[in-house]
Structures are given as structure tokens and as C-alpha cells.
Amino acid sequence: MQQAEPQSFDRVLSSMCTEPHPAAREAAERFLASNPGDPATYETVASLEDRAVELLAALSDHPNPGSAAGYVTSGGTEANIQAVRSARNRHDAADPNVVAPESAHFSFRKAAELLGVDLRTVPLESDYRADLAAVDAAVNASTALVVGVAGTTEYGRVDPIPELTRIAHDAGAMMHVDAAWGGFLLPFTDHDWSFGDAPIDTLTVDPHKFGRAAVPAGGLVARESAALDALAVETPYLETRSQATLTGTRSGAGVAGAVAAMDALWPDGYRGAAKRAAGNAAWLAGALDDRGYDVVDPELPIVAAAVPDEEFTALREAGWKIARTGRGDLRVVCMPHVTRSGLTAFVEELDGIRE
């Protein structure tokens, strides 16, 4: 049988994953069989995980990166579920709820179903950010967690995190920021999103997205160790007697790849990539606007535009991997593998379809 090969990234414009950095690829392969879920046995990968958390904490402006609590998850979904679980476990309501904007990732719906909490989604402002008045009206004494998004999946928007944090804490709830995609871009902007910008409690940030680690490598970082303590269960047959992670056995590939990528790229490599991505997004938005499409101004490097269904379908049939937002807009994510020459070819293909 012929060996299968992964597809090229050349025409992938909709994914929030990208080609891993060569150092991340090599490190991931070396640690495939190490299990961070049993840190007393696999001490080397456990030390690497401590390093990964420290780097993610520094990236997100944690007040004490060297002693930050957290771990390398399988991705943003696991980190978000764990944030909900931690907040639920620390709240005393019999019927806890979570308040999140409509732009929140679908992983929060999974979390609500799995954990038996009520998910209250609130509408967005016209700029696709959380409506603060709606959030304030939705919270009550049973609210365990308020969610803000720093880099929304569809439009790349950053919610007003300091204001959401005040609403959450005034209600006696925890505050979680989902920066799964935006976390490796936002340090090079003037947005307020991090531990340094507001007293947020937990944060999701994924090295396997713009961080260029090998999949899977997500991240959960907490301001205080109590957040992870609330997740711990006894593991009597392991050398380590408790475990806060959601999965048990985990491959060390994600941990080692994340550390290798961040060591290689933080901060200057990421800064350069963020600048290139922003330039590519601005170029594509301008090109689509010049052709008469209704374009959503990119805040982070995601371009959304109202492209007719027949043109969208023709682009897909031509091999372009593109996606739609919930309201039907074309959505292009300018990841590190997306080049100006690739976007030029995309626009030229669109021009040919329009003729």
C-alpha cells in the first residue's frame, strides 16, 4: 500500500492550525512516549511542562510566571472545559451557570452539557464584541464563571476583558479568558486581555495555533493554584497521588513541542509573524473591498467578507480551503503558512470566477 502523505498547506485559508516549527516537530517526536500524566515517573517531561506553563504565563503577563499554575492540554476545548469545571467546583450554587457572549467557542456548549451547568449566552454589540449590559443583566448569585474571548474564532475580536472581569467578580463569579487563538498575537498589540490587564482567574492559550507547536498542544493557565486544586482527583496507583488534568495519559509530544517552539520564537519570532499576518490581512481586506465586497475590518488577522454563495462554492471547487462564519461570510485566517503570494493567487482565482 502506498504511504499516505499529509496535504499541503498551500491552499488552506480557514484553519487556525499551521505548520509546526522544525524544532517543535523534532522535540515532539522525541517525547512521543513520555507521559506527563505521571510526572513522578516521567520526570523530564514533567520539568518541560513546568517550563511550558512558565512561558505561557509570561506571554500572558502573569504576575508570577515561575510559579503559575496550569498545564498543557490537548487544545482549547479541554482548557475551556477545565475552566468551567474549576469554577463550578469552587462555587456553592446548586444550579450554577456560566455567562458567555454568543461569540464564545462551541467548546463551552460541550462543557455545559458535560458538567451540568446552565450556559447563558448573551448578544454581541454591532462590533462583534460582548455586550456588557447584556452580560451584567445575565449574571446572578448562581453564576460561577463569566467568559470573555480574546480573539474570536469568526471575526478575531477582543472582548472588553477588564469590564467583564469587574462584572464577574462583583457577582461572586470567576473570570475566564479564551485566548486560544489570539494569545500568541495579542502581546504585540495594545489590547487589554491578559493577567496584567485585569485580575482574570484563568486563561486558555494554545501553542498549537499561532504558537507553531505540534498538534495537540493547548494551554490552561491560572492566576492561583486554587483553580487547579479544584480539579484534582486522587490517583492512588500512580507515584503522583493526585491529578488535575482532564485526560489521564498524555503524550509528551505536545509538551516538548510547545517548549521547543516557544524557546525558538518568543518573543521576536512571534512578533515578526504577527506583523506579517496583520499585513496580509490588511492587504486581503483591501483587495476584497476594492472589488466591492462588504468586508469586516480585521482587528486581528482574520478577514471576513460577504462573498456570494456561487463564488464561495467555486473557490472551494478550485481547491481553496475556506470557511464561512455563522452569518455566511467568507472567513480567511492569516496563519503563518499563509503568504502574500498565496493570497494573491486566491484573489486572482476569485477574479477569474467573477468574469
Image: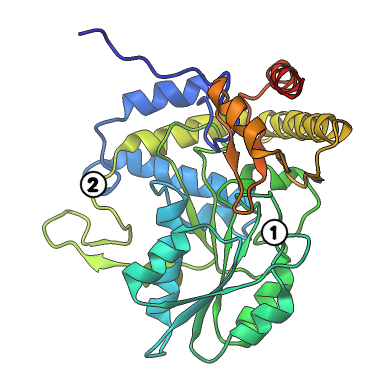
Residue 36 x/y as whole percent: 30, 44
Residue 31 left/right relative to 59: left
Looking at the image, is 296 positioned above or below residue 281?
below
- Residue type at the position of mark 2: Thr
Q: Which residue is mark 1?
A: 193
Label 2 element class? loop
Q: Residue at x 59, y 85 (%)?
A: 139
The quadrant in which the C terminus is found is top right
Near-viewer residue (265 or 141): 141
Q: Which residue is mark 2?
A: 249
Near-viewer residue (355 or 237): 355
Residue 216 left/right relative to 335: left
Near-viewer residue (250 or 323): 323
Q: Residue furthest left?
A: 237
Looking at the image, is 86 positioned above or below residue 54?
below
Q: Look at the image and name its color scheme.
A: rainbow
Category of crowding for the residue at label 2, using alpha-carbon neighbours closer than 10 angstroms: few (below 14), some (14–19), many (at least 20)? few
Residue 305 x/y as whole percent: 74, 42
Residue 267 picture quarter: top right
